[in-house]
Amino acid sequence: MAAKSGYTRPLPLAGDTAPPPPSAVLYVANCGPAVGVTDADVRSVFGAFGEVAGVQAADDSGARIIVRFHEPAAAEAAMAALHGRPCDLLAGRVLHIRYSVPVKPKARPGGSVPVALVASELGIPGIYMVQEFLTAAEEQELLSAVDSKTWKRLAKRRVQHYGYEFLYETRNVDSKQFLGELPTFVSTVLEKIASFPGVKDCTTRLVDQLTVNEYPCGVGLSPHIDTHSAFEEMIFSLSLAGPCIMEFRKYTRGSWRAPSVVNGVDEDSSQEPECIRKAIFLPPRSMLLMSGEGRYAWHHYIPHHKIDAVGGQVIKRNSRRVSFTFRKVRMGPCDCEYKQFCDSHSKRC
Ligand SMILES: O=C(O)CCC(=O)C(=O)O
């Protein structure tokens, strides 16, 4: 499925947001190569309602697509028949479908957000960053280790999972499916994070899940908060091979929503509800810790840029950036104080 459809998902429906008008273009969640649905499957399912003009990735998850019909009536019929119902041709998979909206032009690299070089400049409680967390030799060892393993291809990046598989369609893990201990090639990292600034408790194992992301130049990550019920409070992210900017956004009217229906907030800034934006530069070999308010209440986002503007300088992204994100799988509900963003809280209501 080709990317760059020019369409994206509509905004989450908040009290004062009107749904997008019916059109010939559908945004379909829980569908795509990452969940085992091929281009041919999509064309066969949607083709029953009219001629399909195109099928493209909606984002880099591999689990959300854009389906374009020639006729709005065909899209309307597909929506009526397929949305929220088990689809026989897809082995009972339930598709979540909405009318799509055109992507607005992108902001300039770095936008108008000043980029901090140290975490204290950000002023977000719970965010810590240590530069040169590893030596260049240790960085090379980690890169060689993951490059000798099998990568899983998503729409725009490659990933590996250890400890527990990360399930993109639900943005969660199956806590009963333990894949095994984290690999020995991360032992040095695990030792070092025990004394990381901001780490409160090192009496128990700090992390047991690792996602390795390989981003080609120009690829970023949509804004999201890691699902509260999936992972404990501390999330560590190690940057290797290349730099990036990480932006943090706090939505004043945001709330947690079921990820298979709407997941995170798109980078279509002109449509976004009001938010506070802050950004930090993550050089290679730096380690970031997201905890407390910074982990539970701020979306984190990597802009899809080939260059980043950092304090008057233009920094080129490398041919790739590889990140190691370490998390601890949560075994019960989340009991954080950020109820507005908490899926555990919304399930209890
Ligand atoms: O690449 C990174 O530093 C962040 C990765 C991340 O947020 C994620 O895998 O959910």
Image (cartoon, helix red, strand yellow):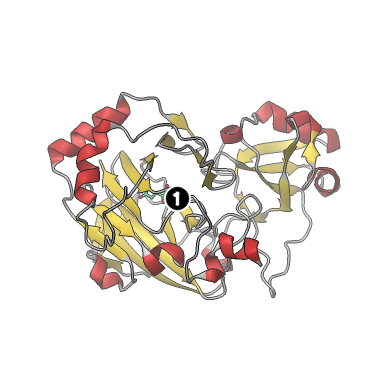
Q: Which quadrant of the figure has residue 280?
A: bottom left
Q: Which quadrant of the figure has residue 44?
A: top right
SS category of the residue bearing label 1: strand
Q: Name the residue type under label 1.
A: Leu
Beta carbon at label 1 within 8 Å of ligand 1: yes
Q: Is residue 1 visible?
A: no
Relative to 186, 219 lies left or right: right
Above or below residue 86? Residue 224 is: below
> Residue, x 45% and y 52% (percent of image)?
231
Residue lying farthest to the front in this orientation: 203
Above or below residue 212? Residue 110 is: below
Instruction: Characterize the local packing of mark 1: few (<14), some (14-19) or many (20 or more) Cα atoms within 10 angstroms.
Output: some
x, y percent for residue 218: 39, 46
x, y percent for residue 84: 77, 47
Q: Is residue 152 visible?
A: yes
Relative to 166, 44 lies left or right: right
Quarter the N terminus occupies = top right
Above or below residue 264? Residue 177 is: above
> Residue, x 83% and y 37% (percent of image)?
50
Per the image, the residue denoted by label 1 is 221
